Image: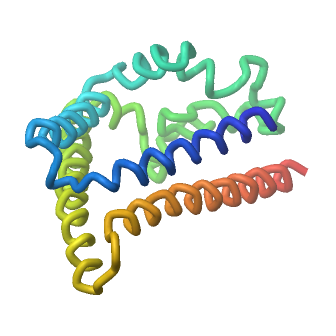
Amino acid sequence: MAETKMTSMNTVWIQAIAGGAFTLIPARKYPAWLRHTLTWGSTAGIFTVMAVPGVASKLQELTTGKTGSEKAAPKDVDAETVGVPSDSVEGVGTGQAGTGKVDGSKPDFQEVDSNPVVRIGLAAAVAACTYGVFRFSFWFDGAAERGLRKLHVPYPRVVMGLGVAALYVVTEKFDRKYEARAGQSSQSDQH
């Protein structure tokens, strides 16, 4: 665990330095092909991962060498191991309770996953949000620099770069605190 935290801490500093350095280059100076590739490439990638069944698990397998099911839980974990009666586990994910009746309050996620219209609709919505975030970020880059110049801040790009680097570090610290609290609460639930 200590090795993971050290690696993660090194990663956040590398991200902070890279993010701060890239902020020194105004987005308006990026060549048009690069802006379009960043925007449309990310949008198409997100759409493909969400819309085409199996792409996400294939990417995970290629990048980590493990399948999603191998990563999710150890193979020796079953209902009795975690203290759940086995009759309450029957029908999980099928929308049926242990009595054999359909439980309308529980969504059937496999049905949503296998419905191509819903899957493509969700993928299109997320892809549109991705496109919008990129467009907003390119606009905001210029607007933030103009705002800092109006406030007569010297070296506005350097100030923006330091702000981005600090944001990476602060976000990582909040994530660590959140994960620590979540880990403590899940341990207290087990006792």
* Position of residue 24 measured from the top left corner of the image (x, y, whole percent): 33, 55
User: Could you tell me which residue is drawn at 58 percent across and 47 percent down?
Assistant: 13
Is residue 27 shown left or right of residue 66?
left
Image quarter hosting the N terminus:
top right
Q: Residue furthest left?
A: 32
User: Could you tell me which residue is drawn at 26 percent across and 71 percent down?
Assistant: 144
User: 116 and 128: which one is in front?
Assistant: 128
User: 110 and 132: which one is in front?
Assistant: 132
Whether residue 67 is situated above or below residue 20 in the rendered picture? above
Whether residue 68 is situated above or below residue 10 in the rendered picture? above
Find residue 62 and report its image quarter: top left
* Position of residue 66 measured from the top left corner of the image (x, y, whole percent): 57, 16
Give the color scheme: rainbow, by chain, secondary structure or one colour.
rainbow
Is residue 153 shown left or right of residue 175?
left
* Position of residue 83 measured from the top left corner of the image (x, y, whole percent): 83, 38
Find residue 127 and report its image quarter: top left
